[in-house]
Amino acid sequence: MILAAVETQLSREPMVETRNRKRLRPNPLAPWELRIGDFRVFYDVEQSGVVTVLAIGTKRGNRLRIEGVEIEL
């Protein structure tokens, strides 16, 4: 499910904000977030257009967990 959504959502115009994709405020994790249900994919886009997935986590309410560790953005 996550791989399909990443391919669909980020293969074209990954730096355009949409309902499920947004630019984040400056933080140490990533500049962009893709929302897929309770999952969050954090990514960066190089000038060449190459998308790099930096982390995948789950979000419930206002709590984000990556590899079981709660993260604050």
Image (spheres, rainbow, N blue to C red):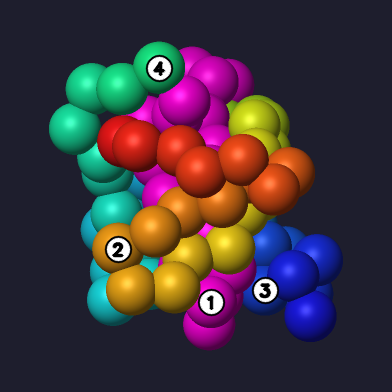
Labelled disc at residue 28: 4
Q: Are marks 3 and 1 in contact (CB under 8 Å)?
A: no
Q: Residue at x 79, y 80 (%)?
A: 1
Asked if 33 appears above or below 36 in the picture, the reply is: above
Structural crowding at the residue carrying mark 3, measured as other residues with C-alpha within 10 Å and reported as few (<14), some (14–19) or many (≥20): some
Give me the C-alpha separation between circle 2 and circle 3. 22 Å
Which residue range is magenta in the image? 29-48
Q: Residue at x 53, y 82 (%)?
A: 37
Q: Is residue 29 left or right of residue 72?
A: right
Badge 3 marks a residue whose secondary structure is helix
Q: Decide whether residue 43 is among the magenta residues.
A: yes
Q: Which residue is mark 1?
A: 38
- Identified by mark 4, the residue type is Pro
Give me the C-alpha separation between circle 1 and circle 4. 21 Å
Q: Position of residue 61 (x, y in %)?
A: 33, 73
Asked if 67 appears above or below 62 in the picture, the reply is: above
- In primary-sequence order, the first of circles 2 and 3 is 3
Quarter where residue 53 is shown: top right
Q: Is residue 33 left or right of residue 67?
A: left
Q: Residue at x 53, y 77 (%)?
A: 38
Q: Is residue 22 left or right of residue 8?
A: left
- Identified by mark 1, the residue type is Asp
- Of residue 67 and residue 27, the one placed in the foreground of this image is 67
Q: Position of residue 32 (x, y in %)?
A: 40, 41
Labelled disc at residue 73: none
Q: Which residue is mark 3?
A: 5
